[in-house]
Image: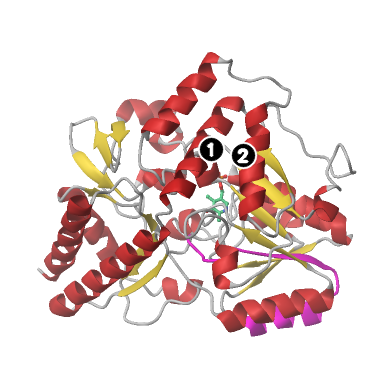
Amino acid sequence: MQRAEKVLVGGVNSPVRAFASVGGQPLFISHASGPFIYDVDGNEYIDLVLSYGPMILGHGYPQVRKAVAAAVELGFSYGATAEKEIYLAELITGAFPTIDKIRFVNSGTEAVLSAIRLARAYTGRDKIIKFSGCYHGHMDALLVAAGSGLATLSLPASKGVPQAAVGNTLVAEYNNIDTVAELFSQHDDIAAVILEPVAGNMGVVVPTAEFLQGLAALAADHGALIIVDEVMTGFRAKFGGTQDLVGIKADITCLGKVIGGGFPVGAYGARAEIMDMVAPLGEVYQAGTLSGNPVAMAAGLATLTELQKQNPYQQFTGRTTSLAETMKAAADEAGIPVTVNAFGSMINPFFTAGEVTDFKSAQASDTRLFGKFFWQMIKNGVFLPPSQFESWFLSTALLEVEFERLEKIVYQSIINLKK
Ligand SMILES: *Cc1c(COP(=O)(O)O)cnc(C)c1O
């Protein structure tokens, strides 16, 4: 820890890993395998962090490992198109009715910033509506009311972001269509509305059908695009987009996490008419030395191929439904207020009695109690994201016996909060 803190900022390469909101020392990981992750002290944990989403097949899945090893034998990076970029793009466009063409990048952040540039170019307008509590990566313009990492550290926005960079960013409330309507009535130059189709960066928050229908109608009336940020949700609740399940049609979709199978991959895609504005066909410049990296493409392709074969989504929903019931039963018994939100393979409890439908209601959660719960779970062998405002993730690697163990641990950890 001391050596890490000397040479890495806060000892980490991404802020939430530092355990700032739950206290105590972060885990140092030696390796991970299947549903488990191991720290350097030799402790085994059921992993519900799963690298914040990507490891949907669990760690080191054999077919993915083989695909990566084979790709490495063929060289690491070419700076020219190779077959697997086409295959992965075909698989993704085939799974998303709203995507004809795609461009691969190296992270979710990069996917979003490119999508925003494209939406501005397409509409000839500058303003963007985002929702408080939604996180879209760390590009300047969207570091406003941005959920998990920032919520955890109680930073309203980031230093070093010039006022001019957020001057075209408008913030509305999730699940509150009136706040969106108001912004559209005040501004006639809105290029796009960006949203997570199920929010996962203020904890899990599911949109209502009325909210999404209202959003679609407003965007259509005002000639604004809808950017659906599926970096977290893509391939997590069905093979394809969560946009299909909740009922919102993306003009531009952002992807990341699962599509790289644990390697640095992001992507943005849209109908051809929009994507053809990107260079070299169009005048929207966007490039990347390592974009479409062959080793990362091999990992993504093997991951999605296996997911399509396994079709684990019904099992995911069954398990998150069951986990939610277990947590509510334990909370009732312990006399602790808990609200559980879940969607597909995403779930988390909020330590509050009220419904959680937006960032404000998420923030009503008792984060100190979450910290205690987090350490109970660690003690009992479960690694959770170290923040109230992060989703937990399920993987296909968790066997039935391990899932039953997880349920018992979750139950007992909530009961133990009473003492
Ligand atoms: C993780 C995430 C991002 C950012 O992706 P990075 O790969 O971390 O840059 C963007 N949007 C959403 C919804 C995310 O969950």
Mark 2 or mark 1: name the one nearer the start of the chain: 2
The number of callouts visible is 2
Quick one: 184 or 216, which is closer to the camera? 216
Q: Kindly tell me whether residue 388 is visible in this rendering.
A: no
Q: Is residue 102 left or right of residue 64?
A: right
Q: Residue at x 64, y 56 (%)?
A: 96
Tell me which amino acid carries mark 2. Answer: Leu
Q: Which mark is residue 88?
A: 2
Quick one: 56 or 239, which is closer to the camera? 239
Q: Is residue 359 magenta?
A: no
Q: Is residue 383 left or right of residue 83?
A: left
Task: Characterize the local packing of mark 2: few (<14), some (14-19) or many (20 or more) Cα atoms within 10 angstroms.
Answer: many
Magenta region, residue range: 176-200
Q: Is residue 190 magenta?
A: yes
Tell me which amino acid carries mark 1. Answer: Gly
Q: Residue at x 18, y 47 (%)?
A: 381
The location of residue 368, given as percent across then percent down, is 28, 64
Q: Kindly tell me whether residue 52 is visible in this rendering.
A: yes
Indicate the secondary structure of the residue bearing disc 2: helix
Q: Are marks 2 and 1 in contact (CB under 8 Å)?
A: yes
Q: What residue does disc 1 label?
A: 300
Which residue is situated farthest in the left direction here? Answer: 419
Q: If the image is split into quadrants, where does the N terminus sit?
A: top left
The location of residue 82, given as percent across then percent down, is 68, 26
Which residue is situated farthest in the front direction here? Answer: 309
How far apart are labels 2 and 1 at the CA level? Answer: 7 Å
Task: Characterize the local packing of mark 1: few (<14), some (14-19) or many (20 or more) Cα atoms within 10 angstroms.
Answer: many
